């Protein structure tokens, strides 16, 4: 294993791994009935914690401090189950958002590769700046030529998108 150099990728990985650690700690509590405390600092130094019954209670027990005795509450298992269910739902939602973010980053990288390959492959097409003139300002022959260009560009983009292996050959970020 080595350190992830890209700041965005490192933060995404941190968030996913942190959620995974919290999930494992929660499973340990549910399956074994243990008390758990986890404290994690992000790459930017921000603290994150998870604890059952609480981080403070676990730390006090670890440091042999007198923590207040638990109350005899018959509703506590239901409350804990509700908290776990909501927390798991939030974790799933965050993981879905992180996956969507990763997908969007990959699409952005793919589009950058396509743009770079297209502009490097035929720079005269980019110099045309076809979008700056309205169709009314062009002659019929110019419109026909631009239509052919756009059809070729569309075909190239579809070809790249249908063959992702080709995108990797275009270079990396």
Image: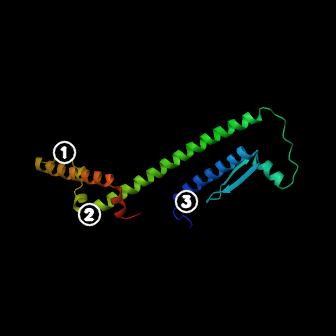
**Which residue does the image show at 18% across and 51% down from the upper left?**
146
**Which residue does the image show at 37% across and 65% down from the upper left?**
171
Q: Which residue in the protein does label 3 denote? A: 10
Say few, some or many: other residues with alpha carbon within 10 Å of mark 1 (under 14 / 14 to 19 / 20 or more). Answer: few
Q: Which residue in the protein does label 2 denote? A: 121
Name the element at disc 2. helix
- In this view, the residue in front, 33 or 92, is 33
How much space separates mark 3 and mark 1, taking CA atoms?
A: 47 Å
Q: Position of residue 126 (x, y in %)?
A: 25, 58
Q: Position of residue 157 (x, y in %)?
A: 29, 53
Counting residues from the start of the chain, the first of labels 2 and 3 encountered is 3
Name the element at disc 1. helix
Counting residues from the start of the chain, the first of labels 3 and 1 encountered is 3
Q: How is the image coloured?
A: rainbow
**Circle number at residue 63:** none
Counting residues from the start of the chain, the first of labels 2 and 1 encountered is 2
- In this view, the residue in front, 17 or 44, is 17
**Which residue does the image show at 56% across and 45% down from the upper left?**
94
Q: Nearer the viewer, mark 2 or mark 1?
A: 2
Q: Position of residue 89 (x, y in %)?
A: 60, 40
How much space separates mark 2 and mark 1, taking CA atoms?
A: 26 Å
Residue 84 versus residue 58 in the image, above or below: above
Give the side of residue 107 with respect to residue 2, left or right.
Answer: left
How much space separates mark 2 and mark 3, taking CA atoms?
A: 33 Å
Q: Which residue in the protein does label 1 denote? A: 135
């Amino acid at each position: 294993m080595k350190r992830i150099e890209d700041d965005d990728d490192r933060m995404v990985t941190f968030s996913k791994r942190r959620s995974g650690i919290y999930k494992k700690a929660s499973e340990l509590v549910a399956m074994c009935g243990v008390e758990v405390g986890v404290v994690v600092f992000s790459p930017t130094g921000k603290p994150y914690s998870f604890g059952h019954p609480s981080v403070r209670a676990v730390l006090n027990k670890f440091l042999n401090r007198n923590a207040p005795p638990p109350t005899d509450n018959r509703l506590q298992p239901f409350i804990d189950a509700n908290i776990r269910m909501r927390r798991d739902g939030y974790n799933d939602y965050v993981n879905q958002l992180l996956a969507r973010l990763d997908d969007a980053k990959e699409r952005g990288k793919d589009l950058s590769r396509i743009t770079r390959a297209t502009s490097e492959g035929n720079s005269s097409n980019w110099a045309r700046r076809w979008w700056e003139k309205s169709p009314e300002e062009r002659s019929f022959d110019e419109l026909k030529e631009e239509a052919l260009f756009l059809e070729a560009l569309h075909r190239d983009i579809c070809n790249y998108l249908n063959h992702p292996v080709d995108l990797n050959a275009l270079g990396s970020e």
